[in-house]
Image: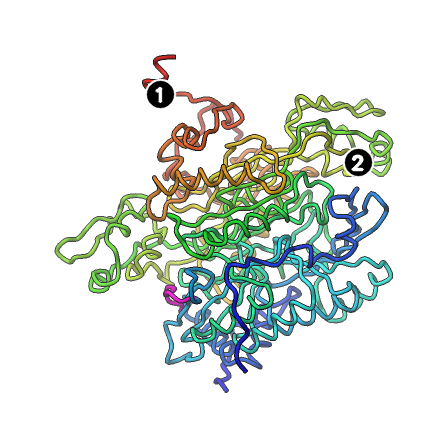
Amino acid sequence: MAKKHQTPLLDELEKGPFPSFVTEIKKAATKSDMAADELGQLEKSYRDQRGYWKHGGIVGVRGYGSGVIGRYSSLPEEFPNVANFHTVRINSISGFFYTSKFLKEMCDIWDKYGSGLTNLHGSTGDLVLLGTTTENLEPIFAEFSSRGFDLGGSGSALRTPSCCVGPARCEWSNINTLDITYSITQEWQDEMHRPAFPYKFKFKTAGCAVDCIASIARADCSIIGTWKGKIAIDQAEVANYAKKGTNISEEIVNRCPSRCMSYDGKELKIADEDCIRCMHCIAKMTKALKPTGERGATILIGSKAPFVIGATLSWVIVPFIKMEPPYTEFKDLIRKMWEFWDEHGKNRERIGELIIRKGMREFLEYIGVNPVPQQVKEPRRDPFFFWTEQDLQK
Amino acid sequence: MSAPQRKTDIGPPHYKDFLPPVIQKNYGDWKYHEVINHGVMVHVANNGDKLWSVRVASPRLLSTDTIRDFAGMAEKYCGGYLRFTTRNNVELLVSDEKNLEPLQKELKSKKYMIGGIGSGISNIVHTQGWVHCHSACTDASGLVKVLMDEFADYFTTKHTPNKVRLAVACCVNMCGAVHCSDIAVVAIHRKIPVVDHDKVKNVCEIPSTIASCPTGAISPDPAKKSVKVNPDKCMYCGNCFTVCPPMEIHDPEYDGVAIVVGGKVGNLRSNPKFSKLAVPFIKNNPPRWPEVTAAVRKIFDAYMAGAKKHERVGEWIERIGWEKFFKVTGLPFTFQHIDDFTIARETFRTAATFKW
């Protein structure tokens, strides 16, 4: 049994109403020497105000180049049970739905082969198993894959796609977010498990512009559901909201960003041609307002955290695309984008950074998408623009 | 006992096998939902079927014991079905109304926190921190714990003008959505990396190390077969450390956190926005970072006092103006607040209109 470490600093984080991660590590430490040393090393980090983990090394399962992140303690003599403390990423279920049966089996496997510590979920959306040894990786993979589960992505590869709860439990979803996520994950297993991209690539699919999966901020490819028809109004339900205390003029009409609504105390009117589909009115009066007509998605590209040129939000490439199985048009579009990235991208350059470096024109021409005003906030302000020989002949 | 037969490239199981029957039946056919309180919402299908979701706080870092406990409660009250939210809460999916009260009773008796739905403070999106990351310069889990303790009432019962999304990132890699959150904490360095020339020579690829620098501060040092860092250009981002570990950037004496505000990802009312700098630096003070919780509290209180219904933090600040934000919060405005990175000139005030 591993040494029981004294943790006076971490003990302070067991106080207070919110559930404590320290309590979780202590629970695991009653059964796992790895978790016990994790706790000890973390206490030392709190004391010294620095981390004690080394950069990841190359570890993994046979035939895969991703799914496992090597993690080694920089203090292996002091904390021998976390000398190897690798992360295993299990590809989560679309929408993060689980059954108790699977979760219990997962716990049994993980108690047998790992620290007993998990993240549900990691930032990208994997079911993260936190801390195991190199020799346990193959048995863990066999246990999970024989039960129908596979590893997620890591490194310069397709990362585990994720989505909002979508049509499984939301009346606002314009697209089948769970199915899109499942379909692209299955389509590109090789791209996920054998890193061959210039850098990472993330898909996130949101059913509407509320964007509960933060796709516009956190995905190289943001798929956001939208519609082309009118918003159907149930005037009786509008009256009900007013009766129950919603100030329709103040909270709904005056908050509309495109000023396309009016209300005279009796009837709510929407000038649908001016609606930009922000979702505010629908989210606040879900019983009264429903989108109608053609459904599809807006495809945006390029969001990422600050490295290297500063944080970016995804920007519109294709304003509207139908998203119906088997999603052929969408998948073909993505393949062209990847080809462009593969051809021109530098090592560790995300696709959005590449587009900024090369210019939107080169990217759009390569993928075969025409310029449309929906792609920009405003046209350029400078007088410096390229003309190709072909442009000059027009 | 030998391990079972492995399979490769099978991908995840089909989601349909993990959906409760009421969802399978009403998939894509929901009519509306109502938030009953911070802990419970009900979704109603076009045919009248109902699904209640009971949301419970989780530290994200979970032991197998706790997962088994959730699984057990799902079996007892939810036919074995549960899900996790994008903000790491647990949702127990109840399709039989009579199970709603006993489930909440059991959760409360086990001291779980029920809440996080609607206009309040939900769980904090965060990163790995000292628990498991090599580049962390603070501990994300610890900051999440102390901030959620501070604002626990807004998770369980109290209301805010609109959702207040918090995030914590333990370095500027920002594996959490810090760059688009209402109020977020991001750990930063303030000293240039210390180059271990002997190791750089053996471990690092010099061109990719130079290319990793966003400000062009790294140049070759041919004599040492290593690199040198221009201290006038380095902005301490640590990207070089990620590609070349012997460029040690951690310095516990000078590392700490910044607080950024006003970001959002949703399109409702106003476009998605980045978070902007409010507090450039607070020294790490584990285990409970009282200076960080006090600063977040100050910003939160000013928002509560000034925001109109449905306004997110960023929408409130845009309405009153950033100059007013610094006035009402009492936060000092410093050189660090004026951008001098890649989009600096976009942020300068090119108008004569502002408040005193």
Q: Is residue A79 above or below residue A340?
A: below
Q: Does A173 lie within the magenta span?
A: no
Residue A57 lies in the magenta stretch: yes
Q: Which residues are magenta?
A: A53-60
Q: Which SS class for mark 2?
A: loop
Q: Nearer the viewer, residue B121 or A140?
A: A140
- Rendered-image quadrant of the C terminus of chain A: top left
Q: Which mark identifies residue A246?
A: 2
How many C-alpha atoms fall within 10 Å of the one at disc 1: few (<14), some, or many (≥20)? few
Residues behind callouts 1 and 2 on a single chain: yes
Q: Residue at x 35, y 40 (%)?
A: A343
Q: Is residue A166 above or below residue B97?
A: above
Q: Chain of mark 2?
A: A
Which of A147 and A102 lies nearest the eye of the viewer? A147
- Magenta span: helix, strand or loop, mainly? loop
* Residue at image coords 68%, 30%: A294
Q: In terms of depth relative to the viewer, which is nearer, B60 or A185? A: A185
Does dot 1 land on a helix, a strand or a loop? loop
Q: Is residue A150 left or right of residue A198?
A: right
Residue B49 % position (x, y)? 84, 50
Name the one closer to the observer, A381 or A66.
A66
Could you tell me residue B336's position as x and y percent?
40, 44
Q: Is residue B186 visible?
A: no
- Kindly report the distance in space between the C-alpha atoms of the residues bearing marks 1 and 2: 50 Å
Identify residue for label 1: A385
Q: Position of residue B356 (x, y in %)?
A: 52, 31
Q: Amino acid at mark 1?
A: Phe
Mark 2: give few (<14), some (14-19) or many (20+) Cα within 10 Å: some
User: Which residue is at a point 67% across and 49% down the rendered structure image?
Assistant: A165
Q: Position of residue B291 (x, y in %)?
A: 52, 58
